Image (tube, rainbow, N blue to C red):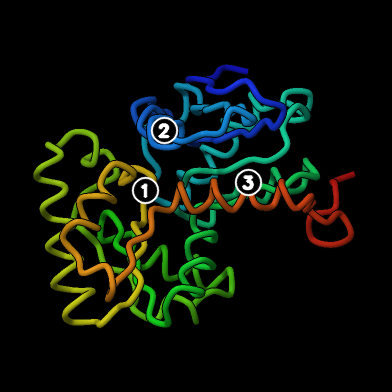
Amino acid sequence: MPITSKTGSGAVRLLVINPNSTVAFTEHIATELASDLPDSYEVTFYTAPASAPASIESMGDGIVTAAACLEELHADDLAQYHGAVVACFSNHPLVHALREEVAYPVVSILEAPLLMGAQLGAHVGILTTSPRWESLLAHDVATLGLSGKNTAGVVSSGFSVLDLERKSPAEVGDRLVQIALDEFYRKRKADVLILGCAGMVGFVEQLRDKIPADDMVVLEPVRCAFEMCVALVRSRARTSKGGIYAKPP
């Protein structure tokens, strides 16, 4: 199974999947998560094959990237892990396919911060990438039954997913801060803000530095999903095989 990088050498093995083919995004995620990883954990960071789209901008991209990953992520490869994170901020088909395949926890970076955010505030917003994602995420959140946790709505930054990598960090960061303050903090009175793309992983501290921490909490979804996965593994939680995620015949 091709991987981008691996860190740690412990007994607990976790898999973090970037389902698009942009290796730079995987590297940013690895840098963020590896900064305080306990020695007891080994994390494998996987990037979708080059045949997959470089970014995920539609439902169709989600299906294509899931299929590309599943061609490489064979059962024998998956069996060595204790938990997995799918790092696409959507109701990605790969999350559900893997939950059917394995018994360990598979955590979505869309679900995790919404569930965490609901415990930190009552008015949760999502700052996403292109305008298309405003309607896509509203649909995904509703499909997952989590609309009641997203009462501050979804707002586009105007950037495409790949813009987060191609444009200067200063340009991206400044715009994210401006929208967070103007749209979510002042206008919508959000008390929790979720960064709605794995590609925003490097900007969370910049936003936290500019936003009054007592009034609006900023959550980075990959970190939320990773910590939730760790918690589930530590609590010996398993994916139930008695219902929707029963192993296919």
Residue 197 % position (x, y)? 36, 50
Label 2 to label 3: alpha-carbon separation: 15 Å
Q: Residues within 10 Å of mark 1 (few under 14, many from 20)?
A: some
> What is the spatial separation of the Cα atoms under label 3 and label 1, in whole angstroms?
28 Å
Residue type at mark 2 is: Ser
Disc 2 designates what residue?
Answer: 35
Q: Which residue appears at 54% of the width and 35% of the height?
A: 17
In this picture, residue 155 sits left or right of residue 113: left
Quarter of the image holding residue 181?
Answer: bottom left
Q: Looking at the image, is mark 1 or mark 2 nearer the viewer?
A: 2
Dot 2 or dot 3, earlier in sequence: 2
Check disc 1 and give the amino acid type. Answer: Glu
Mark 3 or mark 1, whichever is nearer to me:
3
Q: Which residue is mark 3?
A: 230
Q: Residues within 10 Å of mark 2 (few under 14, many from 20)?
A: few
Reading the image, the residue beneath label 1 is: 57
Extreme residue in the front direction: 39
Q: Position of residue 60 (x, y in %)?
A: 47, 47
